């Protein structure tokens, strides 16, 4: 059983997770490595001879004893690593799922803890009311389930990521691979959770998700549209989950008021197909603050079947998986009639799955044994932490939740020095400073991104919601900081830091010119348009405020605001042009900015969120608002013993 599980897992990795051009690496590796079959930890005689011959070395220890120790250690390992989903193996130290026989992977309870538990059990057995009550029954089921989950080992790669924050990324699967994995689902009811990142929303959207995965169309606003769509005898629905919503506002109610805006942005990102979509299945959650995660967890429990967590790398899939997985729902030793009635016919537990059936499990890794509190996947800032799908059943066969590897996305991390890669991730909400930009000035972010206004005689206000350091300077110096060289060829030796690599400094290109095309006068005018103050209409004001959000993929966004004069058209010219049948061709020029990045990528634009007005301004405490003025010079002299007091004493 153990050998067949690992053979099926190897078949899954070689066929589906690697791109078509790189899938040939595994056959070559198998031919060049004679111990390829031994990594499956089988215990046949032929493979035992191969392992014994390869591990032979001039040592006093007998080869048979060493082979027995290696086999005994291999039998204690799980089928797949619960942290990354990689196949358990002891051959390739750099590959996911590698286990070494070190002390850190051998989890033993301390003697003191065992003694304390024994003393506690003895004390509880003495005060037990019933004489038939055994000490073991006094231990709660939750404690036993937690102890079982903590005894599961993780591979060396997950251990280094968890404790040392170091590791290597894996090859990201293509959308065709994800499609083949989902199509091999053994469940009739399937639900896809498309995870999006709030930091650069909606750049993390997979626009061709429905067509690539061959999923039914989303439910439209037509009241006659079907609630469920069947394809090949199965149902498949899609929900959009926006993670890390705590980066948008400090309070949950403020984020809830943004939902109409987020739905409109998602509808625009979906293109023509999403114009008339309902989008009632959009959730804006925060795994860190616990916003809307209980509701998503309850939906997963009630749906059952297979839940597929799909998204690009570093969007927070594993962190979301940990908080929405229904842990501790099925009570041990208690039969739930409602649960048994909802089980699909033919559903089986993890131990009863037949891995020899290629039609049902050849494209999926073995499912983990069901536990009350299983070990969750590793959460790390490293892109590509999840090596292969991680299947976790729940509800005694009611369903399972599958964490899929992230799809490749363009990111700045390949152009940033290794010591600064972690600085690209926005870990908490940023309260930016207001920067004023004029023509001839540029805004630098980390020295690698440069934003330059192009409209003359116009003042821009910029708010950078990014974890990168900001710096405003002239265009000439900004170009020298970003590229490392002045126009005359002189090297830049200033103090402003640039996190880009030397190779990326020579690849700086224009990412395009972006227009501030959205009118935000009503929100930015303040008391002028307030119903309780000025009560003026925004179109009657002598100025117009334009805004836009410049998105940086995987990093954050920059909110831009610009106020221009509102030019009123002459009524005479309009009447004359109307009489002559000529349409007025005059159009107001919109403010423009230009962005420079490595290779001219990683930039997008969206309608402004106005995050600065919602939660961007720093609130000053009352005791700090009325600060005492500085003391006068005479007061300081009197405190020091000089001035008039010293003169009176002398006389």
Image: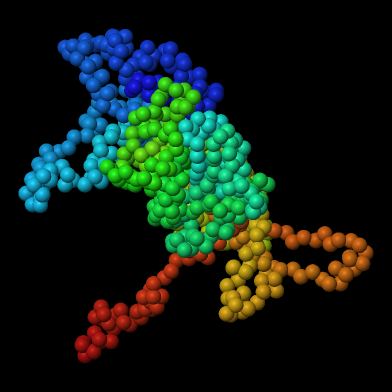
Count the marks: how many? 0
Q: Which of 199 and 192 lies nearest the eye of the viewer?
A: 192
Residue 411 at what x, y percent from top left?
Answer: 52, 40
Q: Quadrant of residue 236?
A: top right
Residue 469 in view here: no
Please give the name of the residue rendered at 46% of the width and 19% of the height, measured from the top-left corner.
26
Please give the name of the residue rendered at 74% of the width and 68% of the height, measured from the top-left corner.
567
Q: Is residue 640 above or below residue 478?
A: below
Q: Residue furthest left?
A: 126
Q: Is residue 375 found left or right of 420 in the rendered image?
A: left
Q: Is residue 86 above or below residue 497?
A: above
Residue 477 at what x, y percent from top left?
Answer: 55, 50
Q: Is residue 424 found left or right of 480 in the rendered image?
A: left
Residue 470 at what x, y percent from top left?
Answer: 49, 54
Residue 35 in view here: yes
Q: Quadrant of residue 163?
A: top left
Give the color scheme: rainbow, by chain, secondary structure or one colour.
Answer: rainbow
Q: Is residue 533 found left or right of 417 in the rendered image?
A: right
Q: From the image, which quarter does the N terminus lie in?
A: top left
Please give the name of the residue rendered at 39% of the width and 46% of the height, measured from the top-left corner.
338
Residue 418 at what x, y percent from top left?
Answer: 42, 38
Q: Is residue 392 above or below residue 54?
A: below
Q: From the image, which quarter does the C terminus lie in?
A: bottom left
Please give the name of the residue rendered at 80% of the width and 61% of the height, measured from the top-left corner.
586
Q: Residue furthest right?
A: 580
Q: Quadrant of residue 489?
A: top right
Q: Is residue 633 above or below residue 502?
A: below
Q: Which of 440 and 98 lies nearest the eye of the viewer?
A: 98
């Amino acid at each position: 059983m153990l050998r067949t599980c690992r053979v099926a897992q190897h078949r899954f990795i070689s066929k589906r997770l690697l791109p078509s051009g790189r899938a040939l690496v595994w056959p070559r590796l198998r031919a060049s490595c004679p111990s390829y079959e031994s990594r499956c930890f089988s215990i046949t005689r032929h493979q035992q001879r191969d392992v014994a011959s390869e591990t032979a070395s001039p040592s006093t220890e007998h080869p048979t004893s060493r082979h027995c120790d290696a086999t005994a250690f291999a039998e204690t390992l799980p089928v797949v690593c619960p942290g990354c989903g990689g196949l358990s193996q002891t051959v390739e130290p750099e590959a996911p799922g590698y286990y070494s026989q070190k002390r850190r992977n051998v989890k033993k309870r301390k003697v003191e803890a065992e003694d304390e538990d024994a003393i506690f059990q003895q004390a509880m057995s003495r005060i037990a009311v019933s004489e038939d009550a055994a000490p073991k029954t006094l231990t709660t089921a939750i404690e036993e389930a937690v102890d079982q989950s903590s005894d599961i080992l993780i591979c060396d790669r997950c251990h280094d990521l968890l404790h040392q924050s170091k590791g290597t990324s894996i090859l990201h699967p293509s959308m065709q691979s994800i499609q083949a994995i989902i199509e091999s689902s053994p469940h009739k009811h399937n639900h896809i959770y498309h995870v999006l990142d709030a930091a650069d929303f909606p750049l993390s959207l997979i626009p061709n998700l429905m067509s690539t995965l061959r999923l039914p169309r989303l439910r439209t606003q037509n009241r006659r549209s079907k609630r469920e769509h069947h394809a090949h005898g199965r149902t498949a629905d899609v929900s959009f989950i926006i993670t890390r919503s705590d980066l948008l506002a400090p309070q949950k109610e403020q984020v809830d008021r943004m939902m109409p805006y987020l739905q409109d942005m998602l509808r625009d990102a979906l293109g023509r197909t999403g114009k008339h979509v309902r989008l009632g299945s959009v959730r804006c959650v925060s795994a860190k603050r616990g916003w809307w995660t209980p509701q998503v967890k309850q939906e997963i429990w009630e749906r059952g079947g297979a839940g597929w967590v799909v998204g690009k790398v570093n969007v927070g899939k594993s962190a979301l998986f940990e908080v929405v997985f229904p842990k501790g729902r099925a009570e041990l030793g208690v039969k739930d009639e409602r649960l048994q009635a909802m089980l699909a016919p033919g559903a089986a537990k993890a131990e009863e799955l037949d891995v020899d059936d290629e039609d049902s499990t050849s494209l999926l890794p073995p499912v983990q044994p069901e536990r009350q509190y299983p070990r969750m996947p590793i959460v790390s800032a490293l892109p590509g932490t999840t090596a292969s799908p991680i299947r976790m059943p729940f509800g005694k066969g009611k369903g399972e939740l599958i964490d899929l590897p992230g799809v490749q996305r363009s990111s700045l991390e390949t152009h940033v020095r290794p010591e600064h890669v972690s600085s690209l991730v926005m870990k908490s909400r940023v309260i930016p400073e207001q920067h004023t930009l004029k023509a001839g000035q540029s805004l630098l972010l980390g020295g690698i991104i440069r934003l330059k206004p192009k409209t003359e005689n116009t003042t821009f206000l910029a708010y950078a919601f990014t974890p990168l350091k900001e710096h405003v300077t002239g265009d000439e110096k900004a170009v020298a900081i970003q590229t490392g060289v002045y126009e005359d060829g002189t090297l830049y030796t200033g103090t402003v830091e640039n996190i880009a690599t030397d190779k990326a400094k020579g690849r700086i290109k224009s990412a395009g010119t972006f227009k501030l095309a959205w009118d935000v006068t009503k929100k930015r005018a303040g008391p002028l348009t307030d119903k309780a103050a000025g009560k003026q209409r925004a179109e009657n004001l002598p100025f117009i405020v334009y805004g836009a959000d410049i998105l940086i993929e995987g990093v954050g966004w920059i909110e831009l605001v610009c106020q221009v004069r509102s030019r009123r058209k002459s009524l005479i010219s309009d009447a004359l042009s109307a009489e002559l049948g000529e349409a007025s061709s005059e159009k107001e020029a919109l403010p423009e900015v230009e962005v420079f990045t490595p290779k001219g990528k990683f930039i997008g634009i969206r309608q402004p969120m106005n995050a600065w007005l919602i939660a961007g301004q720093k609130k000053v405490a009352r005791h700090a608002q009325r600060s005492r003025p500085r003391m006068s010079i005479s007061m300081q002299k009197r405190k020091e013993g000089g001035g008039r007091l010293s003169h009176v004493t002398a006389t």
